[in-house]
Amino acid sequence: GIGPSKAHSYMLRMKTWKSALQCIRCEAKWVVPNRYQHEYVQALYTFRHQRVYDPTQRKLVHLQPVPRICDVLEVFGNTNFLGAYIEPRVAQQIAEGIIDPITREPFQSQLLQSISYAPSFLQQPPPQQQQPRPQ
């Protein structure tokens, strides 16, 4: 097969992944599966546009904005591979470690029950008091 160093040499020569893939197909030394290009693009979208928790907005957002969602739907049929939609309240509880991301049930921990837990990113800084000026 083609390892990282061989793939890198193709990329240096051909400049783009599409050209490199086309060159590999033309040389006929290796068999490139028909769905490889489709799955490669899907992997790129997955890494660039996956859903992540944003503590400032307290909800899931795309890591980078998804360009033209209708194009994504046309090519892939759905956007599930970018991560499922999770309601903001549930996403916040998962991110804070309050509920299990699989079962969505609260974690049962004596430690959590014995302390008042508030993640540092949710705590508001104390208001700054103005110091009286010396006269």
Image: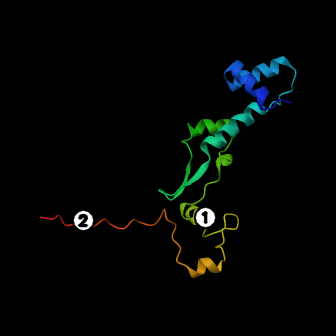
Which residue occupies 68% across, 41% down? 77
Task: Identify the element where label 1 is drawn.
Answer: helix
Horizontal arrangement in the rendering, residue 91 relative to residue 43 (left or right)? left
Alpha-carbon span between mark 1 and mark 2: 38 Å
Task: Identify the element where label 2 is drawn.
Answer: loop
Which residue occupies 71% across, 18% down? 13
Q: Position of residue 80 (x, y in %)?
A: 67, 48
Type of the residue with mark 2:
Gln
Q: Quick check: 106 above or below 28?
A: below
Type of the residue with mark 1:
Ile
Horizontal arrangement in the rendering, residue 68 relative to residue 134 (left or right)? right
Residue 39: image quadrant is top right
Q: Position of residue 128 (x, y in %)?
A: 31, 65
Q: Which residue is mark 2?
A: 130
Which residue occupies 66% across, 72% down? 105
Label 1 crowd (10 A; few <14 / some 14-19 / many >=20)? some
Quadrant including the C terminus: bottom left
Q: Which residue is mark 1?
A: 94
| Render colour scheme | rainbow
Upstream in sequence: badge 1 or badge 2: 1
